[in-house]
Amino acid sequence: MTKSIAKPIKTPKEVEREFNLLRVLVGMAIALFIAFLIILLISKTPLAALESFIIGPLTTLRRIGNIVEAMTPLLFTGVAVCFIFSANQTNMAVEGGFLLGALGATIGATVFHLPPVLHPLVCMLLGGLFGAFACYVPAILYVKFNSKPVVSSLMMNYICMYIALGIINHVIRDPGAGFPASYTFDETAQLARILKGTHIHAGILIGLAVALFGYLYLYRSRRGYEIRMVGKNMNFAAYSGMPVNTVLMRSQLIGGFLAGMGGAVEVLGMYTRFQYQGLTGHGFDGILVGIIAGYNPAMVPLAALFLGYIRVGADVMSRMNDIPIELVSIIQSIIIVLVVAERFLYKLKHRKLVEVAHKELAREEVAAHE
Amino acid sequence: MNNNILSAILSAEFAYSVIRVTTPLLFCALAALVCNRGGVLNIAFEGCMLTAAFCGVVGSAYSQSLFVGLLAGLAGGIGIMMLMGYFNLILNANVVLTGIALNTFASGGTVFALYILCNDKGLSTSLQSLAFPTVNIPLIQDIPMLGKILSGHNVLTYVSFLFVFLVYLLIFKTPLGLRIRAVGENPNAASSVGINVTKTKFITLLIGGLIASLGGVYMSMGYLTWFGRDMVAGRGFIGIAAQNLGNAAPVPTFVAALFFGFANALSNVLQTQDIPSEAVQAIPYIATLIGLIAYSSSTRKKRLGRKVPRRRIADGL
Amino acid sequence: MDTVVLSMENITKVYSNGFVANKNVNFSVNEGEIHALVGENGAGKSTLMKVLFGVEKPDEGHIYLRGKEIHIDNPIVAIKSGIGMVHQHFMLVPSLTVAENIVLGMEPRKKGFFSMERAVEITEKAAAQFHFQVDATAKIEDLSVGKKQKIEILKALVRGARILILDEPTAVLTPQETKELFIELKNLRDEGLTVIFISHKLNEVTELCDRITVMRAGRSIGVQEVKNVSESDISRKMIGRDIQLNIQKTRAKPGATILEVANVSKNSSTSAKKALDSVSFRVRRGEILGIAGVEGNGQTELSESITGMNKDFEGSIKIGGLDVRSHSIRQTRENGLAHISEDRITYGIVGDGSIEENIISDRYYKPEFQKGPLLDFKKIDALADGLIKDFTIKCDGRDQPIKMLSGGNMQKVVVAREFTSGSSLIVANQPTRGIDVGASEFIRNKLVELRDNGAGVLLISADLNEVMELSDSLIVMSDGKIAAYFEDAGSVSTDELGEYMLGIKTMSPDRIRSVAGND
């Protein structure tokens, strides 16, 4: 009997995983492709615009720095979204939480006077607590009143915005500044610059640490396991004995805290005073980052890097050419929609799964005849 | 100061302004009502209204025809809803995340297009867009107090009142409305008698998109006469909350929309007083939160085991 | 002379997981008769009717309507052919009125608008024609279950049904409503309609029906005139045992009481009857107490109450002395409870998780699996691998998504988790339903092993073979009450057990009380 050399065929598990990754990559590719089409159609100098977009971010040290600076806050909000969405809660108050976090840090940096290292830490802590509050409200409304967090978190974002602006404009406003802004931060509170010639600050290191923390917590600790199981099947979690309500609150409080910390880090690292005029969009960017990362904090740095890169690319393009930076929003929305559409590429996946099943059957038959 | 505020509120001008600001909320609430009844409630109304607002301005500016502008606005808004239908019903995408994506698309896309057309990212004032006229109703305008409240509104405001009645007719008095309700409450029952559930849901989205688009068109061609970035400012979500509060019934939804309109108008009045404007501007959103709590605390659901039977129809958002 | 109006020949249906639901079934019905189709759960009667109504396609076989062959590809074709189905779960829209539900899909119009007057007219005319009492303008959600069912029937009649299939119609009715239903069905028969009556309540069948077809294990056992058979005859045909399981089991040596159920009652949310009616019994360590009974007689509500999934009941339930209602599920589990749920997909597993994630869900938080602040994956991986081996779970490794496993292997994962937590009480609800023979045997042997090691087992099963051979003692549940108790499960015959299950025979309350341990 001849012995057949069986070529290793894929298992169904591998096909499934491949296709999830494929959906993300294809989604990103299609979005970029459409963006390129738009650029070609609209710009008077399409090739130059494309060059700005694709290569632009790498052309000067300053711009490379911009990528890192853009990436930094997304590390925080992206990981925050990982926590919240892993529990299957669509609580989008990370947006408001980010701004409240910036507010908290501002209060800490202007009202308190502390020695270095301790000062920014206290500010970040304060920012985190403020951010946790933002996410707390929609979370408790669900646990206590069964009000799904979708609309309530969006309302909370506006409320957070008005709280932040109200306090900045009426309580800690600096009359000396020419525009509505807070007093300047103490020097001891600001985060140190890391790379000369850029605005990269210690926040990137803190952000990467947060991603590591997020991964370890969510995927390597018992509390994170609980969060993910509650998110995947709340009934199963309760039946197995997990304290579902506690887990829901915990995941959203941690998420809010991280979002707030992100706001604190951003404002202490990039600015010398609070001068935001409205919601910053970092929270919603964090949702995109979370979706691309598959809600896994370990993948957040890559996803944040991607988003940061296209942000800077679009910025360069908008300065040098005639394409507005809002192109990024268009790219973002296309990616989200394609990644979450389960039936996107479904036929392909189904065909592949059937193929794998056939191959497996054939191999078993051959083995049986030997 | 309190007397000032009280006298401001109890005036005819205030009541007039309440009706004025309620109009977009009412349109959106009615659209959400139809979609809720049909089982396709979603959060893309914000993006739908914004797109309609933009397309209306652009359409009317380039054609110098109000009618074309209206059509363009409707096409834009309905287009967003049809995309929602495609991604959610055909490709099985999560309805909330798709809504976020569409809203993001509308928000960025409208500014993008605005810049391309006007070289301005903030306002469309460089475009000569048209606006819907205000109407002075002949006999009513002469009634002492009531006249000032009810007459002189934009024609679209009166259209929104009309739509309360039209939505009532559609949902409760037509065969299509019957099917929409059946599909929304028990799709199995509907398909067991031969109704095409997916087709009905698409029709529901079309109608909801149309009504919400009217609200969007009102924003940029009535309430204001230009398009500004993010000008819908959350009204799409407040509309959803209003129909929640109104239990998806036309008249109670109308009342709920008025309530949120009241909060909105109140915040406008208080801004002229010495109260920090931010606190005041937050009022509509806080009111919505309270409204959501009021709605949800009357529906109970056990996490394990069976649901407690509820008197409300589709839970929606 | 009776004319055959419907004939199903050689129907075979095998589901994609290999389960043979119908095997060469022949089923024929005469015009103008009420024909009973009886069998236990899983006997194949639901599948046969699904084939008839176009919800399922048979793998083999033909259907003839009045002598001509028809292909019923979907319910619309069935309805057009005059076949109407009254489902167990009503296909009604709660907030609409009776008339609106009746005309849904064929709405009458007046100038483009929906004509409620015409709808009411159509409804009342049909109701009068078939002697039904209906209030056409009442809302469905305000109606009693019995009335809702009438509307379902009327819906089918209005669409021209001449053959009416009723699937377990009396399961949700009160005795009074059942009487009314029977009068209506007899009226319909006298009008020339044909009724197929699916049930397992033999007293009703003998009262109402003309002929009866018995199904068992996917086959048709035979058809007879009701006037020629007794309930015991039917029971024997329905509840026979085809195979001996041959479970190796020594005599039980019961120890201390581990589960105490005292006077537990619960209202039903779907009908006016009580779901549980003052149920009392105990389970001791080292014994397997089985609960036999046709599904839907309170077993689900009972196991939900015992395992802490539903705390809405009266009476007391204690596991190892701990009151279940005032403690969390985790506390109850830590105090010795293990639970195999009858709804594997909803409660037993997390479908999107890996095998490992499923296996550790009851113990992931315990100190022995922590290494500092993180989980000790070395130990967890070893545990998972060990359990996969011990329970011979056929898979691609512990990281494989559990939803890719076969039903039997999925259940093995559940069982691997629940049987190794050192528990003193195991509640096993339909543990081998829908699973292949090999896995079933494995699970049953494990249950005996656990009993021998001192655990108490409460076995709820609709599989008669299983519950009779595996149990040491046996309870029969019927209508939310304990209908019979046999201290020695081996002492009762299948036929006798069947009669208790189907309500033909009842036991004296004194004999039943001994199961509560009051002797």
Image (cartoon, coloured by chain):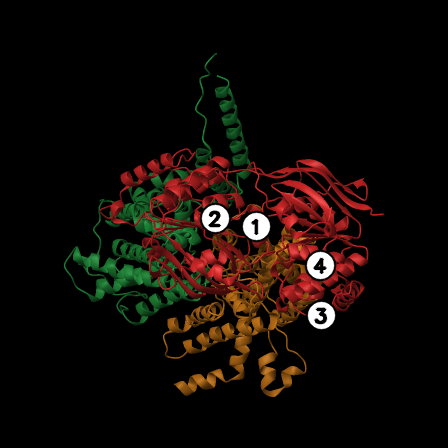
At numbered mark 2, what does the secondary structure look like: helix, strand or loop?
helix
Q: Are marks 3 and 1 in contact (CB under 8 Å)?
A: no
Q: Quadrant of residue C443?
A: top left
Rounded to the nearest angstrom, the CA distance separating label 4 from label 2 is 42 Å
Residue drawn 38% across the image and 71% down it: B278
Q: What residue type is labelled 1?
A: Glu
Q: Which chain is orange?
A: B
The foreground one among C48 and C366 is C48
Rounded to the nearest angstrom, the CA distance separating label 3 from label 1 is 45 Å
Left/right of residue B69 with respect to residue C161 in the rendered view: left
Q: Do labels 2 and 1 share a chain?
A: yes
Q: What residue type is labelled 2?
A: Ala
Q: The red chain is which one?
A: C
Nearest to N terminus: mark 2 or mark 1: 2
> x, y (%) of residue C401?
43, 39
At numbered mark 4, what does the secondary structure look like: helix, strand or loop?
helix
Q: Are marks 3 and 1 on the same chain?
A: yes
> Does residue A41 lie above or below B188 as drawn?
above
Closer to the eye: label 1 or 4: 1
> Can you identify the residue that label 2 sits on?
C489
> Can you identify the residue that label 4 sits on?
C153
Closer to the eye: label 3 or 1: 1
Label 3 crowd (10 A; few <14 / some 14-19 / many >=20): some
